[in-house]
Image (cartoon, rainbow, N blue to C red):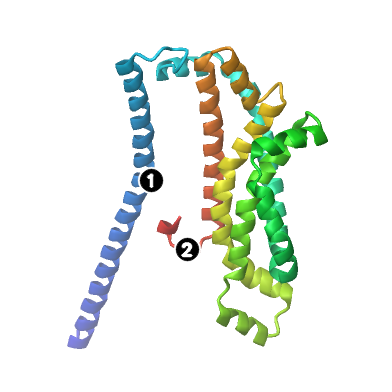
């Protein structure tokens, strides 16, 4: 074998070894990030529960004011059927409001980006309407729509609408000027510019808003149930408060928080599936 062949083989082996070392480092770092994402939230939740338990024990808080974590766990198990029956309508209202509010926000943002006059006219109106507290909007919507699921879905949609609108408008407008000029030089239509440039650029902004809306839509549904409802987590919270049933009150709060966390997780998973060109640590 010639010297040049030996040198080439050595160089190839060194390259493969370097590539393998780099892959091992990447895999180790990726595994470390995954464990970090799982362990740190678990530690945070565990620390909060321990602090809650310590406050109850040290200050001898009465059960009707704040129950112990174990009392809440017992209530979650003993009344799981009632809690799940009330969770279902709240979940339906929150999911309906999430879809309605975000779809409306995306549509309005698209119109605003393509028509600056309409944006200048109606964006301040949207801002002023968003400034009205939910507890003031909810009774009005109940009077208009009745006492069914419609006002609750509408309130949840209103909660989701404004953050998604603001982020979507920003994402659609913050396009690279050079990329926009290139699309125009290539005689791209408005539809092609929108779907191939603006929309792709706006996706990270959109999912940032969707993560906010995923938790806020549950809050909107619960507030809607406070105004007028006989079923749902919001109605259950009111009933437990009036009856001084603090374990049931806290159990209902835990259920609503769990529902918000589930919506947030689904949006996060959808973001990782849709936006694959971003670095993993950006999620």
Residue lying at the far left in this picture: please name it.
3
Label tally = 2
Local packing at callout 2 (Cα closer than 10 Å; few below 14, some 14-19, many 20+) is few
Q: In which quarter of the image is residue 1?
A: bottom left
Closer to the chain start, of discs 1 and 2, is 1
Q: Is 68 on the left or on the right of 177, as rendered?
A: left
**Residue at mark 2:** 278
Is residue 178 or residue 126 the one in the foreground? 126
Position of residue 234 relative to residue 207, above or below, is above
Name which residue lies at 47% across and 12% down.
Answer: 64
The residues bearing labels 1 and 2 have C-alpha atoms spaced at a distance of 18 Å
Counting from the top left corner in percent of width and height, residue 128 is at 67, 52
Q: Is mark 1 on a helix, strand or loop?
A: helix
Position of residue 216 relative to residue 188, above or below, is above
Q: Quadrant of residue 84?
A: top right
Q: In which quarter of the image is residue 274?
A: bottom right
Local packing at callout 1 (Cα closer than 10 Å; few below 14, some 14-19, many 20+) is few
Name which residue lies at 56% across and 82% down.
Answer: 178
Counting from the top left corner in percent of width and height, residue 66 is at 44, 18
Q: Is mark 2 on a helix, strand or loop?
A: loop
Is residue 179 or residue 163 the one in the foreground? 163
Position of residue 57 relative to residue 25, above or below, is above
Q: Residue 263 carries which label?
A: none
Is residue 76 or residue 128 the one in the foreground? 128
**Residue at mark 1:** 37
Name which residue lies at 38% across and 45% down.
Answer: 37
- On the question of residue 102 being in view, the answer is no
- On the question of residue 118 being in view, the answer is yes
């Amino acid at each position: 074998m010639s010297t040049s062949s030996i040198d080439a083989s050595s160089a190839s082996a060194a390259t493969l070894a370097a590539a393998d070392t780099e892959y091992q480092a990447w895999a180790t770092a990726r595994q470390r990030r995954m464990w970090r994402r799982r362990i740190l939230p678990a530690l945070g939740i565990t620390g909060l529960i321990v602090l809650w338990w310590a406050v109850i024990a040290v200050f001898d808080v009465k059960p009707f004011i704040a129950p112990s974590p174990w009392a809440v766990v017992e209530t979650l198990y003993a009344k799981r059927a009632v809690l799940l029956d009330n969770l279902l309508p709240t979940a339906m209202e929150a999911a309906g409001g999430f879809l309605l509010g975000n779809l409306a926000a995306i549509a309005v943002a698209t119109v605003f980006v393509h028509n600056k006059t309409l944006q200048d006219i109606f964006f301040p109106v949207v801002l002023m309407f968003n400034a009205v507290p939910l507890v003031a909007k909810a009774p009005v919507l109940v009077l208009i729509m009745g006492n069914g699921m419609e006002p609750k879905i509408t309130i949840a949609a209103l909660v989701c609408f404004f953050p998604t609108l603001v982020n979507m408008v920003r994402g659609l407008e913050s396009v690279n000027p050079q990329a926009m000029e290139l699309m125009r030089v290539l005689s791209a239509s408005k539809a092609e510019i929108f779907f191939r440039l603006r929309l792709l650029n706006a996706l990270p902004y959109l999912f940032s808003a969707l993560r906010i809306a995923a938790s806020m839509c549950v809050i909107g549904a619960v507030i809607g149930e406070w105004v007028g409802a006989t079923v749902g987590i919001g109605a259950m919270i009111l009933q437990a408060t009036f009856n001084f049933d603090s374990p049931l009150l806290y159990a209902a709060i835990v259920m609503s928080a769990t529902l918000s966390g589930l919506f947030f997780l689904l949006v996060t998973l959808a973001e990782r599936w849709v936006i694959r060109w971003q670095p993993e640590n950006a999620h």
